[in-house]
Image (cartoon, rainbow, N blue to C red):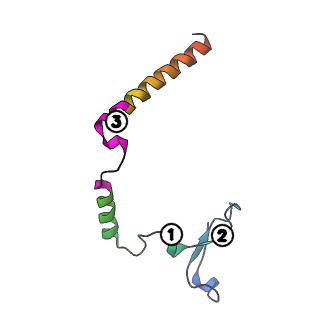
């Protein structure tokens, strides 16, 4: 990763730039100031936002007790069956 300070490219750019040079798949540079929506927040504000986000109930089948139990039962049964298939293919 490379960061170009303002003094190196002040004629064309006014923000700090960053990009990965090792990976030629992504040749474009991204403005460092555009990377995070939390960039202008204080540490206390960021902690509060993270606290609110962690308290939100995610919309997922895992939030529903019945569906979560069904999924876990399926998962356990699946891996038991896979283990039996692998053991039988090894001749045990």
Q: Tell me the SS state at disc 2.
A: loop
Q: What residue span does the magenta drawing correspond to?
A: 54-70
Give left or right: position of 33 versus 72: right
The answer to whether the residues at label 3 and label 1 have Cβ atoms under 8 Å apart is no
Give left or right: position of 7 versus 61: right
Q: On residue 12, which mark appears?
A: none
**Residue at 37%, 73% in the rendered image:** 41
Question: x, y (%) of residue 92?
Answer: 57, 10
Q: On residue 35, which mark appears?
A: 1
**Residue at 34%, 69% in the rendered image:** 43
**Residue at 52%, 22% in the rendered image:** 82
Alpha carbon separation for disc pair 2 and 3: 44 Å
Residue 69 versus residue 13 in the image, above or below = above
**Residue at 71%, 62% in the rendered image:** 24
Residue 28 lies in the magenta stretch: no
Which residue does the numbered mark 3 point to in the structure image?
Answer: 67
* Count of labels in the image: 3
Q: Tell me the SS state at disc 1.
A: loop
Residue 62 lies in the magenta stretch: yes
Alpha carbon separation for disc pair 2 and 1: 14 Å
Question: x, y (%) of residue 31?
Answer: 56, 74
Crowd tier of the residue under label 3, counting other residues whose Cα lies within 10 Å: few below 14, some 14–19, many 20 or above: few
Q: Is the N terminus in the top left, top right, bottom left or bottom right quadrant? A: bottom right
Which residue does the numbered mark 2 point to in the structure image?
Answer: 28
Nearest to N terminus: mark 2 or mark 3: 2
Quadrant for residue 16, please give it. Answer: bottom right
Q: Nearer the viewer, residue 7 or 78?
A: 78
- Dominant secondary structure, magenta: helix
Name the residue furthest bottom.
11
């Amino acid at each position: 990763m490379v960061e170009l300070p303002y003094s190196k490219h002040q004629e064309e750019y006014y923000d700090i730039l960053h990009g990965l040079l090792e990976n030629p798949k992504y040749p474009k540079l991204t403005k460092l100031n555009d990377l995070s929506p939390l960039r202008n927040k204080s540490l206390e504000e960021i902690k509060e936002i993270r606290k609110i986000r962690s308290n939100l109930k995610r919309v997922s089948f895992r939030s529903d007790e019945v569906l979560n139990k069904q999924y876990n039962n399926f998962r356990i049964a699946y891996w038991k069956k896979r283990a039996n298939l692998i053991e039988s293919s090894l001749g045990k």
